[in-house]
Amino acid sequence: MNPNIIQKARQTLSKVKPKLNKKEKILVALSGGKDSTTTAYLLKKFGYKIEGIHINLGMGDYSEKCLNAVKELCRQLDIKLHLYDIKKEMGSSMCYIRTGIQNEKHGKGLKNCAICGVIKKWILNKRARELHVNYIATGHNLDDEAQTSLINIFKGSPELSLNTGIISKDVEDKQKRFIPRLKPLFYIPENEIRKFAVKEKLPVVFDKCPCAIDSYRIQVRNFTNKLFDEQKLNIIKNAEGIIKKLDVKTGEISYCELCGEPARNRVCKRCELVRIKK
Ligand code: AMP
Ligand code: ZN
């Protein structure tokens, strides 16, 4: 019999190195969707010390529904919720930020989800550090990870797959500004999570984000949706196997010249995007 999602998530977490300590604080990035909601539910069930964080993206009714679902979840789980508003963090709602960037020469062709993802990650890391947590947990599932792996191959950037894994790679972070990220649902297929969230009657918004249109990921998802779960797992295993063999050192982290956040280059991705507007 297939292990159920509870066993699978427990197993996944037991593989994290260095071993997770139940005294450490995990901040769960809650979108209001099934994946991050299930992540928080399971971490709480397993006895981890968790708090929630939600960024209100200011996208009308959809964002209102997400905010209400997240509040209800944190009430049910009896965990602290840290709320942030994109308008306060970035000056305007996600729709305006994105259109502003896409209307500039350098932003042409950038997809909605790509821009939103960069900005969310930037806010999450900054706020998580201020909150002195040890980890940020996200709801990324097996389907997401298989898609990312394929996207990196299709785009000819296999080096990006070096960052794949249930926990972000241990990098040398002299200024201690990067908060490691955990993905407890890494090996769990999306359809199993959906069924679980429904069965457990978790407060979840099942609507799709109204802005998630025309992304490269959607095209890849149309393909991965046709695969068996085992094939998705094999895509991940393939990436993991190659990384192990390569034994690449992830090296030292650098910091953005403009905002001071962790960055791969001189300027972080968020500042690269926002600067385009000027
Ligand atoms: P996405 O970028 O929408 O695929 O989301 C990836 C992960 O980021 C989700 O599983 C959540 O853990 C987190 N996340 C997405 N949206 C939000 C949000 N508005 N606030 C906090 N965390 C979020
Ligand atoms: Zn920056």
Image: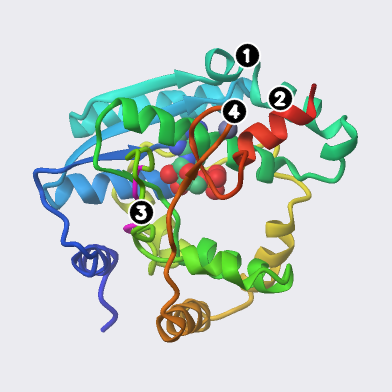
Q: Is mark 4 within 8 Å of ligand 2?
A: yes
**In this rendering, the label closer to the viewer, 4 or 1:** 4
Is 182 magenta? The answer is yes
Residue 31 relative to residue 63: left or right = left
Q: Residue drawn at (72%, 72%), measured in percent from left and top?
A: 156
Cα–Cα span, label 2 and label 3 = 32 Å
Cα–Cα span, label 1 and label 2 = 8 Å
Q: Quadrant of residue 50?
A: top left
Tag 3 or tag 1, which sits nearer the N-term? 1
Q: For mark 4, what is the residue?
A: 258
Q: Position of residue 262 (x, y in %)?
A: 48, 41
- In the structure shown, which secondary structural element does the residue marked by tag 4 occupy? loop
Q: For mark 2, what is the residue?
A: 97
- In the structure shown, which secondary structural element does the residue marked by tag 1 occupy? loop
Which of 110 and 40 lies nearest the eye of the viewer?
A: 110
Which of 230 and 247 lies nearest the eye of the viewer?
A: 247
Outermost residue toward the right in this view: 105
